[in-house]
Amino acid sequence: MELRQLRHFIALAEERSVTAAARRELIVQSGLSNSLQTLERELGTELYLRGTRPVRLTATGEALLAPAREALRAAETARRAVQETREVLVGRLRLGIALSAQYLVPFAGYLGAFLRDHPGVDVRMRPAAALVMLDMVENGELDCAIGPALEQRGRLRLTSLASEPLALTCRSDHELARRDHVTVADLAGERFVDVPPGWTARLLCDALFAGAGITRRIVAEVGDWEVLLEMIAAGAGIGFTPVGLQYRVLTGPDSLLRHLRVDGAQMDRHLYLILPSRAETSPAAAAFAAGMLARHSSPTGPVGSDRVDRDGRTDVPPGGGAG
């Protein structure tokens, strides 16, 4: 079997569609189908069920998936070993990012400097929810990520970059806005606009209300902070948001929104540079991380100076993070 065939198989398994897998691999659909059929003939078994939407793997296909990924990682490691003997860094950097974090961690500027210093590297950015990015770095689908996290995971290396609190956000004409601060109990019965499950901001909010024994009504789930703020401004409900978001609906002179402090609600958004273990870190990711950390100074103070230790681990504050 060929590495190309394994790559096509993995694309099918992850995209769950022959059409989407072919688009991802930049080949025609018939080419990908022929590649998969050749692989099946060589293995003497079917790897996926035809005619299902989304595509489902057979039992043997599921068994092949992890070894196929490991084979591609091993091939990539061999390629890197050769590249490291050359002075010019070439290859690809797959970077996961939390787009709303740009004002805290200006990754666009860091990437621009990195690409100027290393013109032989191509960057592929993937915006994703925090927990998804952690999974993707851990599984080798991303080389590194910039985003939030709640806790240390496996062999991942986390370096603190910045932090800020979450605050209750509502319209200035809302009854709660007349107060300087509120309690969690005061929020019982309110309508909430929130981010989807899997975002760490959602996990923090759910834990806050579960700890207080309060069931809250979420009238809308929105996977974009700007749209979420627009919905709060439109009167759909209230919600918890990072205080430093730089959207006009929040910062403009005609903004209808106000932040409130909630007594007893210790919720902070912590952003990290997330890398795999040293042995699994690509040369491109290592160079990007080194350059970014050399340029980065956190606007929130000490967390920006935290660095990965010798064992490739850092302390992650309990309950820290936001989607």
Image: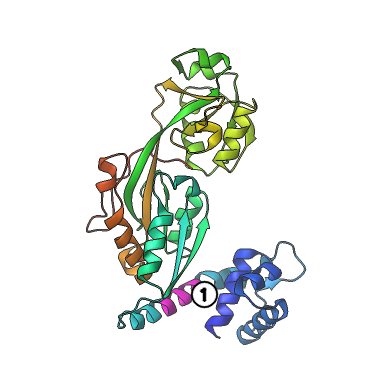
Does residue 181 lie above or below 217 as drawn? Answer: above
- The stretch in magenta equals 67-76
Residue in the image at 56% along x and 81% along y: 4
Q: Quadrant of the N terminus?
A: bottom right
Query: Which coloring applies here?
Result: rainbow
Q: Whole-percent x and y of residue 13?
A: 61, 67
Residue in the image at 51% along x and 69% along y: 66
Instruction: Identify the amino acid type marked 1.
Output: Ala
Near mark 1 (Cα within 10 A), the count class, few <14, some 14-19 or many ≥20, is some
The reply to whether the magenta stretch includes residue 279 is: no
Name the one closer to the observer, 323 or 50.
323
How many numbered marks are there?
1
- Location of residue 311 (image quadrant): bottom left
Q: Whole-percent x and y of residue 241?
A: 49, 33
Q: Residue furthest left?
A: 310
Q: Whole-percent x and y of residue 76?
A: 42, 77
The reply to whether the magenta stretch includes residue 71 is: yes
Q: For this view, does 101 lie left or right of residue 152?
A: right
Residue that carries the numbered disc 1 in the rendered image? 68
The prevailing secondary structure element of the residues shown in magenta is helix
